[in-house]
Amino acid sequence: MVVLMCSYHLDGVYTRQLSFFGNDKLGNACHNALKDQLQLDHFETKTSNVFNTFKQGNVQASRKQVAPLLKNFIETL
């Protein structure tokens, strides 16, 4: 599984996204483990057939906070 994190400004609004590519079962489990802390909301993109993409409502959680959450999830497998 590949996890893609991105952030950008769109119309003056700071946004973060988190995308999962690869094993759908693992990606769904990871999403379920992180959705409350990161306030993840699924949305459709042009690449939805390849990536499961989520808008990260908790924009204060940078990669420095997200990476340890992902690591903790992986260690529970």
Image (cartoon, rainbow, N blue to C red):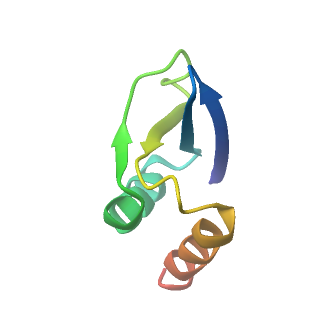
Front-lying residue, 70 or 26: 70
Task: Please determine whether, in this image, residue 38 is positioned above or below residue 20.
Answer: below
Indicate the position of residue 60 as horizontal and vertical percent values. 53, 60
Q: Quadrant of the rendered structure where residue 1 is? A: bottom right
Task: Please determine whether, in this image, residue 55 is positioned above or below residue 32.
Answer: above
Residue at position x 54%, y 38% from top? 15
Indicate the position of residue 20 as horizontal and vertical percent values. 55, 46
Front-lying residue, 14 or 66: 14
Residue with the most extreme top position: 46
Q: Quadrant of the rendered structure where residue 8 is? A: top right
Residue at position x 67%, y 62% from top? 63
Residue at position x 60%, y 71% from top? 65
Task: Please determine whether, in this image, residue 66 is positioned above or below residue 19.
Answer: below
Left or right position of 21 against 54: right
Indicate the position of residue 36 as horizontal and vertical percent values. 31, 63
Residue at position x 49%, y 23% from top? 49
Give the number of marks. Answer: 0
